[in-house]
Amino acid sequence: MSIKILIIEDEKSLADMIALHLQEEGYHTELIYDSKQALPTLMRFKPDIIVTDLMFSGMVEYALIGQLRQYTTVPVLVISNNTLLNIRIKALDDGADDFLCKPFNLRELNARIKALLRRCGRNIPAESQAITKKLKKVRVWVNDYRHSLLVDDREVEVTQIEFSIIKELSCYPGKVFTRSELMDRIKGGDGAYLDRTIDVHISSLRKKIERDPKNPQHIRTVWGRGYKYEM
């Protein structure tokens, strides 16, 4: 039976990326974006380990770890943008087993999960041991909380519109957006733009995130329809 990991994270693009990575590592994941669903999901899913943020809707939820600890003794790994020492200490005092500051590398997340599983005597999935040797590094990470774009662990400067475009695309990997759909979501549907404006911003983004902008692997053109994002 595969090890079950509950992920509690309201930054959707990051949460989906973590879930996808852990699934590829051989884990069974359950993902929720709202901390209010933590306890009901915990009781239903019965995870072997919990990965949770502390920041929800811009607020630190100190009580979350304590609430989880009332119902489970499984390892809890906290991930958070908040790097203040007192926040980390309180999380650990409240019952967290480890604390990982954002932004982080998915390989480090995987290593910490393995360490926690070993500590509580759980077997690491065979798939994870094999895949780790050839783990593909996630290149592009949209950090909504810090309003930043990381490419190969390096922060890249983007405009407000460029950030909004990559955030929208990355939240729905594989979904095809027309030019007007993208601009309506970004501009609020006011129609105050030229039909090809989006192409200029896409071209600029590709130069910043693609290894070969002329042969893009992330922001793909779907001819006659629009654009889609590939992880």
Image (cartoon, rainbow, N blue to C red):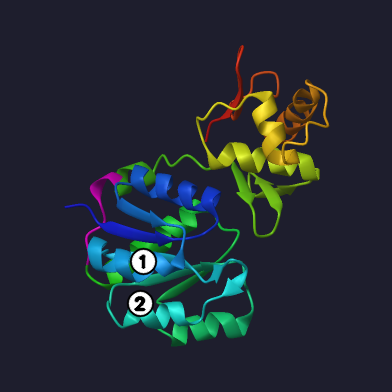
Left or right: residue 134 compared with residue 194: left
Of the two numbered discs 1 and 2 in the rendering, the one whose residue sits closer to the viewer = 2
**Between 51 and 55, which is closer to the camera in this rendering?**
55
Whether tag 1 and tag 2 are in contact, CB under 8 A, the answer is: yes
Q: Which residues are magenta?
A: 122-127
**Between 40 and 14, which is closer to the camera in this rendering?**
40
Residue 212 shows in this picture: no
**Element under label 1?**
strand
The residue shown at (31%, 67%) is 40
**Element under label 2?**
helix
Q: Residues within 10 Å of mark 2 (few under 14, many from 20)?
A: some
- Where in the figure is residue 52, as x and y percent of width and height? 45, 66
**Residue 178 in magenta?**
no
Determine which quarter of the picture holds residue 133: top left
Spatial CA span between label 1 and label 2: 9 Å
- Give the mark count: 2
Left or right: residue 43 compared with residue 158: left
Instruction: Relative to 89, say whether 18 is above or below.
Output: above
- Where in the figure is residue 179, as x and y percent of width and height? 68, 25
Residue 225 shows in this picture: yes
Residue underneath mark 2: 68
Determine which quarter of the picture holds residue 185: top right
Outermost residue to the front: 190
Residue type marked 2: Leu
Left or right: residue 118 compared with residue 32: left
Name which of mark 1 and mark 2 comes first in the sequence: 1
Residue 50's disc is: 1
Q: What secondary structure do most residues of the magenta stretch adopt?
A: loop
**Between 176 and 213, which is closer to the camera in this rendering?**
176
Instruction: Relative to 84, say whether 197 is above or below.
Output: above
Instruction: Relative to 202, say whether 114 is above or below.
Output: below
